[in-house]
Image (tube, rainbow, N blue to C red):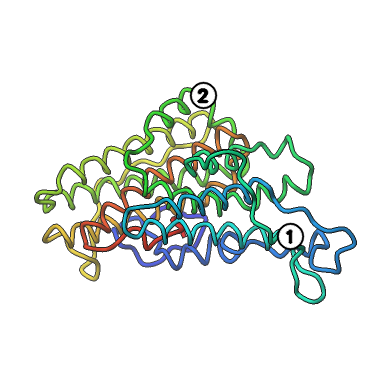
């Protein structure tokens, strides 16, 4: 059994194991990544001596998502974008804080006015994600760094709405020194855990594909993405001089977990091993320090989240019900 940086839960795929969404969320991200820490550190929860300024990039992102909601024509898409816009707006308000009467400053409650025609929210997401904290004032940089796991979760959910995976952007990123943008102290163990989880998901994909029926091509595409992620994370570990976990000789699925007996059950099982991969990518976000490393984490989280969404669709679920991924 590998030594994980966190206390593992009973395994789904035995020999190494698969942390559940709820347990891993509490242990790794906790309330910090979903609600972040209170802003009292900067004095923002006291009476305003000067009115705090809203995070303009987040306000713009919220405005772009609202515009996308208004123009959406596919069923469920408008509600999805509205919910995401609300998530972002709440983070803007959280950063601004409140006065003694519990009121947010007016500048933070007014929606941003878009200059020009609305863009694809992808561009607005990437503008925030690739912001370099080193180029910002210390307080703003702290907010950008703290909110990054949130951004990755929102972006990954957004990526499931795109008609095609943005593989070209990932291929371009991996020609750049993305591994050098990770924190040397924390990233290696996080990347090693990511590789280990990806090994398990790849093995499970083989079990699931045996009963995929007419959905075989979808399973194969998700498995291919997992192998590409494994290779990219392995390359990063080599760059950082950290040992790379080897795949186990074999894994087994406990009887208490979904057994791949038909397409729906296979999708359920495969989905269960994809969720920890997106979660670990979101966890890795805290160690991504350069713009290219941040984009690498976000785009890969989005690509694997698309696999989650595909498995949800096979089970008859609506992926648009999930507005934050990797939680």
**Count of numbered badges drawn on the protein:** 2
Answer above or below: position of 105 versus 291.
below
Mark nearer the viewer, 1 or 2: 1
Answer above or below: position of 297 versus 78.
above
Q: Which mark is residue 34?
A: none
Query: Gap in Å between the C-alphas at discs 1 and 2?
Result: 35 Å
Q: Nearer the viewer, residue 35 or 3?
A: 35
Sequence-wise, the earlier of marks 1 and 2 is 1
Which residue is tagged 1? 96
Q: Nearer the viewer, residue 308 or 5?
A: 308
List the single residue furthest toward the top.
175
x, y percent for residue 45: 79, 67
Q: Identify the element where label 2 is drawn.
A: loop
Q: Is residue 49 left or right of residue 72?
A: right
x, y percent for residue 54: 72, 53
x, y percent for residue 39: 74, 62
Q: Identify the element where label 1 is drawn.
A: helix
Q: Nearer the viewer, residue 88 or 298?
A: 88
Give the residue displayed 62% in from the left and 35% down from the top.
290
Q: Is residue 90 left or right of residue 245?
A: right
Which residue is tagged 2? 176
Q: Is residue 38 left or right of residue 222?
A: right
Give the residue displayed 59% in from the left and 37% down from the top.
130
Label 2 crowd bin: few (<14), some (14–19), many (20+), radius 10 Å: few
The picture quadrant where one finds residue 253 is bottom left
Q: Are marks 1 and 2 in contact (CB under 8 Å)?
A: no
Label 1 crowd bin: few (<14), some (14–19), many (20+), radius 10 Å: many
List the single residue furthest toward the right.
49
The picture quadrant where one finds residue 293 is top right
x, y percent for residue 152: 51, 49
Quadrant into which the N terminus falls: bottom left
């Amino acid at each position: 059994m590998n030594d994980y940086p966190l206390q593992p839960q009973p395994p789904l795929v035995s020999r190494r194991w698969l942390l559940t969404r709820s347990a891993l969320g509490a242990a790794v991200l906790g309330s910090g990544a979903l609600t972040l820490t209170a802003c009292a550190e900067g004095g923002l929860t006291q009476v305003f001596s000067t009115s705090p300024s809203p995070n303009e990039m987040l306000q713009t992102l919220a405005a772009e998502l609202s515009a996308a909601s208004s123009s959406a024509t596919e069923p469920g898409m408008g509600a999805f974008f509205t919910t995401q816009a609300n998530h972002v707006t709440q983070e803007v308000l959280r950063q601004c804080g409140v006065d003694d009467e519990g009121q947010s400053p007016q500048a933070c409650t007014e929606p941003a006015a878009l200059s020009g025609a609305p863009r694809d929210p992808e561009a607005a997401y990437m503008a925030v994600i690739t912001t370099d904290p080193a180029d910002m004032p210390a307080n703003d940089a702290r907010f950008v760094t703290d909110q990054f796991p949130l951004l990755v979760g929102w972006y990954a959910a957004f990526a499931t709405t795109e008609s095609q995976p943005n593989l070209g952007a990932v291929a371009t990123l991996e020609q750049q020194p993305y591994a050098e943008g990770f924190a040397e102290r924390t990233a290696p163990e996080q990347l090693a855990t990511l590789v280990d989880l990806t090994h398990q998901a790849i093995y499970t994909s083989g079990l699931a594909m045996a009963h995929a029926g007419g959905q075989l091509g979808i399973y194969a595409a998700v498995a291919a993405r997992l192998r590409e992620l494994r290779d990219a994370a392995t390359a990063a570990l080599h760059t950082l001089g950290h040992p790379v976990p080897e795949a186990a000789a074999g894994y087994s699925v406990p009887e208490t977990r979904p057994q791949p007996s038909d397409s729906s059950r296979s999708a359920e099982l495969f989905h269960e091993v994809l969720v920890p991969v997106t979660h670990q990518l979101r966890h890795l976000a805290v160690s991504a320090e350069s713009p290219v490393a941040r984009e690498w984490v976000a785009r890969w989280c989005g690509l694997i989240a698309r696999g989650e969404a595909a498995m949800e669709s096979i089970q008859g679920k609506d992926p648009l019900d999930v507005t934050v991924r990797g939680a």
